[in-house]
Image (spheres, rainbow, N blue to C red):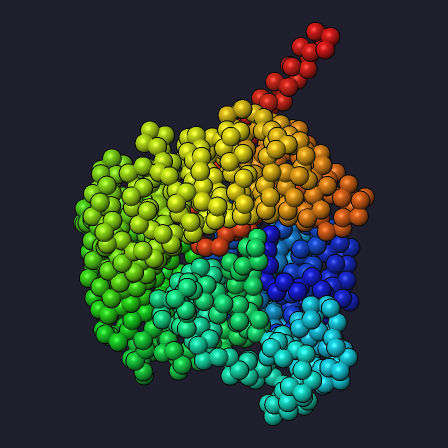
Amino acid sequence: MMPNISNPDNDIVVGFKKEEETIIEYLFHGSDEREVILITGMGGLGKTTLAKRVYEKKNVANFFDECAWCTVSQEYDCKGLLNKIYGQVCGSEIKMGSSVSEELRKSLMGKRYLIVLDDIWSPEAWEELNRVFPSCDNGSRIVLTSREENVVSDAKHIHLPFFSTDESWELLQVKLFKGKGCPKELENVGREISKKCGGLPLTVGLIAGLLEKDKNSEKKWRKFLLTLNSHVTFGDGIQSNDAIELSYRYLSDHLKPCLLYFAAFLEDEKIKVSKLIELWISEGFIIGMTEKERVEDEAEDYLNHLVSSNLIMVSGENYDGRIISCTVHDLVRDFCLTKAREEISMEIINMEKKWDPTLNFIPHRMCFHMHSTSDNASKLVPRNSSIHTVLVFHHHYSPFYNASWIAKKFEHLTILDLEAIRVYQSFLSEVSSLTHLRYLALEVDVHQNDDANDVSPLLLQNLKCLITLKLRSNKVHFPIFLGNMSTLRHMVITGGVSCNKSCMEKSRSVMIEAIPACSKELQTWESRCPLTPMHEDLLRKLPCLKVLRCGVSSSDGFPEIDFLHHLETLELSSNYESFPLSKFPSSIKKIHLHFITLSVSAISTIAQLPNLGSLILLGCKFEESLIWILEEETKFPKLKILQLVLLDIGIWNISNVAESFPCLEQLDLGYCRNLLLMPSSFDDVITLKKIFVTNCNHNVDSWAKNIEESARDIGNEQLNVEIIKASSINSEHESIYDSSDSNSEHESNFVNEAWNKFKLVVHAGMRKFDDMCAKIKRGERRRKRAGV
């Protein structure tokens, strides 16, 4: 599935209805030969929005065997793009040593496929990608969006016209009044303002952002119209760049650096809000909080202001409407790139392009966009003590990189983000000297040429100014907790290796030392290692903890946590250990359990939580074996999202669905291959909007379709059922389980590790499905012989 890149008001469709019908006609009724459809128009006209509208239609998805969406952009990496498409088509990563071009071509051969290549810029890019897609004479289609009409010569071409004044006015009303209608006294001046937007939907959105605060004042609208007239540079319409400049000028001063910071990220990147906010905080951009306000809440408010101005687009939301990911339009990003150097002293260095190493100004922030692990940067960047921020982004997964030059050249760093690349373990001793660091993100690994494998991660305890610490490793044993950091707010220590005895002993001594000095402001604690009762004294020193992610050990027990009165997210992972808790803080909103064994009483305890809005069970088992029964007294009063992934059950029974889930909005069933009997009355849940079924079995598919039909029969038109055709575990479909309800990138790290474990056992689950069917059939034969 393609990520949602629009604002919540995108349910109301404005413009391009004729063009949409034409594209659908080309998709369904064209030649059997593979055909290319090219959508062109100037930046900000809505090419991506139109393509997305078509791509997400259910009849389009059902018509094609395989569908994939990929954003190309000006700066693209062909291999990386093909890997993304391969992941969507094949549901797995390409094997080492294999040619992704050849493997993708083989996977598409003989299938009717739809590939969307969004934002493609050159004929060279098209030729490089085109040769991979086979022509099988079965009605396959490729859709391109581009500002350039010459990217492909043999395509069915749809050129998007500018919006008419009526369409611009309709869109302006949608943006401002969400379909509720505009006051009559504003109609005349509103049409005049719409006319000045030059027929560009992007400009209309930006203008709507400027009018948002005064959307019911005719006097202020007329005053704004006079301001708008002074910016019209040609004809009778304002250019998009002028509209962006005007929107920027109208921003409060404290929001301007936050907007320009988007220049640091890769083009068309889906940006995790948690990471963005952590960087803003570490940069010192967030100001003006009262003593009772969390700095993260204030930062979130900053982001909401940028979204309401239509400068930033929402690409993912939490179940409670909070933004979890966002993106920025190319034109807005271009504006930020231009302004960032001057306004926030940020230099963006694209390692693919030639650039002047003798910078004609002294930046405070440097951002490297890497395509390889070349050491050009270390050779070209001069020693510079004024640089306090270094961010590294990579277009695809990176091998080892020797980053020691960064610690040596930039001695006064406050922000160092290297999680896009892998660094040697020896780097820990070098980075430990950067005592001014407030933000540190590393992926650390052991390499055969690394002569410092015994360098202790405990060296990082020297970094007493840290606010955010993120460490990930598949081989290095990090302690479960790093103390002595009195300002630490977010600590994420993850990886593929469980704690060994040595690691646990080190953790024990570290925690005893850390209790007096640990940060009372810690908000996030995530660790691969299991918590035990010995951690309870430390947990009691963390009164502000909001997110806890950890493992569960059967032999050592689990600490009590009911005293964590601000805890909102709890994630537990184990190797099918029993659920360890009987008491929870009432503040919990999300519980994610991975490979935990659950009893009836455990489910009942979870259900009683008054604020629980999201429950994810991934790979969990029930003490009652293949049956999960929810009794009538078990009620989830505020649960909005329920996700069941790889549950080893054959029967799921609920006494009264509507009473058990009175507020449920979304139900996800993924890879529940054994599930044969399900509750029949989910159509009675009037709040239910979505049911996702991914790679279960025919019974589950039929059940979901029947629920949708029954809901329609009783007048519930809002329920949408989506049955995802996935021949194997698909990286794009995984997002249903790890991001629809996530409010941080840390959560995706934790869930990804669970998914890795999930992939190892999914095929065993498929085999169990056949065994289950055989057992049921044998039971039926026995009952018949017995006359039952």
- In this rendering, the answer to whether 427 lies above or below 206 is above
Q: Residue at x 36, y 50 (%)?
A: 525
> Image check: 749 left or right of 605?
left
- In this rendering, the answer to whether 679 lies above or below 102 is above
Number of numbered discs on residues: 0
> Image check: 107 left or right of 443?
right
- In this rendering, the answer to whether 236 lies above or below 206 is below
Q: Residue at x 55, y 51 (%)?
A: 740
Q: Where, by quadrant of the figure, is residue 281 drawn?
A: bottom left
Q: Quadrant of the C terminus?
A: top right
Nearest the eye: 517 or 348: 517
Residue 421 visible to an observer of this rendering: no
Residue 549 rendering spot, x and y as whole percentages: 40, 45
Q: Residue at x 67, y 57 (%)?
A: 55
Nearest the eye: 405 or 31: 405
Residue 211 rendering spot, x and y as whole percentages: 62, 79
Q: Where, by quadrant of the figure, is residue 91 drawn?
A: top right
Extreme residue toward the top, this view: 786
Q: Where, by quadrant of the figure, is residue 192 drawn?
A: bottom right
Nearest the eye: 297 or 428: 297
Nearest the eye: 428 or 248: 248
> Image check: 313 left or right of 699?
left
Residue 310 visible to an observer of this rendering: yes
Q: Residue at x 67, y 87 (%)?
A: 219
Residue 773 rendering spot, x and y as whole percentages: 63, 22
